[in-house]
Amino acid sequence: MSDRRAVLAALLSLTALPVLAAEDGSRVEPVALPFAVKAMRGPGSDVALSVATSGLLPVARAPAAASADPKATGNTAPPSVVVVWGEGGGAVLSLDGDRLRTTLIGAEAIEGFAAAETPRGAVPGSRRALDGPLSAYLTGPTRALGGAPGQGTVLTLRERQPLGVTAEPKAVPVTTQTLAPGDGRVFAGRTPQITRLDGRPAVAAVTAQGPAVSGLAVAAKGTDGVWTLRAQTPPQAGKGPEGAPLALAAIADFTGTGQPQIAAIRAPDGEGVLQLWRIADGTLSLAGEAPGYAGPVAGEAADLAAPVPRGGGAPPDLALPVAGRGALAVVSLKGSPVERARLPLPAPAAHGVAVLDAGGTAKTILVGLADGRLVAVSAP
């Protein structure tokens, strides 16, 4: 018992550290939690969606929120939450107006949701992406091909189909398609991200070719319902002895053109280069890049970047750590990458970066730190 009291006292002392402030008035404040954060999932992740629709939270009790019918009507969007957990506890962060609300829940419950991130047949340790009826994940371990842990030979796409009106309970029909990157490539151990191109679903994933070369691939669903690999970037060499693969940062309409772009970090270990890739006419073209940023290294599951919605029809910014992870940058990608804010962190970012918004405008950026703390950054 005395050991647990000592740990709790240490954590409480950490949250008592001074509030940091940036030149624009944004504040970095610690979030009081009775455990050290070891993992973090942001809005739209498998864990966050599962928790938000599980009934564990009062805000998740609308019956339509968990509908399995992809054509269900009404407001089916689950509440936007961030989930963190560690040894001995878990918490769900959400907004109550402009105020950050923390709901403590059992770590065992969250770990159960986290286990579902890796569906049956997926590469061990990998995570799936979810968006409505569509899920995307890696299958086919590459060990026989000399691939690294977490890589997959195939991108698997599963879509729930409309169930229709029935008097008897029936399983929701599901269609499954698989895609391989070809050309001696495999899919790198990065979680895919789902978006829409020309109004139809699309999935972005990272490919790897040997130990030090990687690129981006975009799969899109055609008007005939068939998925194909729409575009791939030229292979890019990583830095360092292990050549860490590209990291997907985020997908959003960062330039305000009406179509999404892909933000990625090349060679994310150390001095990473932020890249913006445009998708048009079946090709991926580099629209801009800027050095000095960090992403997850190979084998790291943290999501270290998130779009920052600005509201009022303005394109979103991107929040991500700078090189060394000692500060959080908010970058505009509308033209050449320009930092709108840089906020010092009391410890390096490690477990994730996530944004909570209200009405389409970012209010709070949450960052999981290497020392187990969680900090809340007021959006600039």
Image (tube, rainbow, N blue to C red):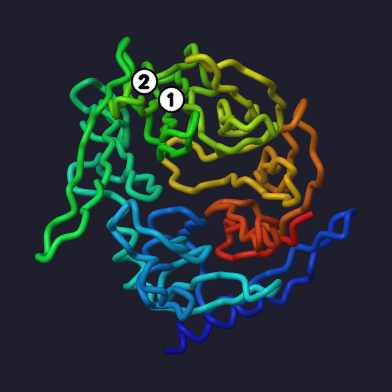
Instruction: Give the residue displayed 27% in from the left and 42% down from the top.
Output: 159
Q: Quadrant of residue 268?
A: top right
Q: Quadrant of residue 220?
A: top left
- Judged from the image, the secondary structure of the residue bearing numbered disc 1 is strand
Instruction: Give the residue displayed 66% in from the left and 61% down from the top.
Output: 359
Residue 368 position in % (x across, y down)? 58, 58
Residue under pointer 1: 218
Q: Residues within 10 Å of mark 1 (few under 14, many from 20)?
A: many
On the picture, is 341 further left or further right than 80?
A: right
Residue furthest toward the right?
23
Relative to residue 11, is residue 186 depicted above or below? above
Q: Identify which residue, 360 or 241, lies in the foreground.
A: 360
Residue 247 position in % (x across, y down)? 51, 33
Q: Mark 1 or mark 2, which has the lower sequence index?
A: 1
- Judged from the image, the secondary structure of the residue bearing numbered disc 2 is strand
Amino acid carrying mark 2 in the image: Leu
Does residue 264 show up? no
Instruction: Give the residue displayed 25% in from the left and 49% down from the top.
Output: 162
Q: Identify which residue, 158 or 329, lies in the foreground.
A: 158
Quadrant showing the C terminus? bottom right
Quadrant showing the N terminus? bottom left
Q: Which mark is residue 300?
A: none
Residue 357 position in % (x across, y down)? 64, 60
On the picture, is 318 further left or further right than 25?
A: left
On the picture, is 136 further left or further right than 353?
A: left
Instruction: Give the residue displayed 50% in from the left and 66% down from the top.
Output: 79
Residue under pointer 2: 229
Relative to residue 233, is residue 372 depicted above or below? below
Q: Are marks 1 and 2 in contact (CB under 8 Å)?
A: yes
Q: Quadrant of residue 24?
A: bottom right
Q: Residues within 10 Å of mark 2 (few under 14, many from 20)?
A: some
On the picture, is 320 further left or further right than 304?
A: right
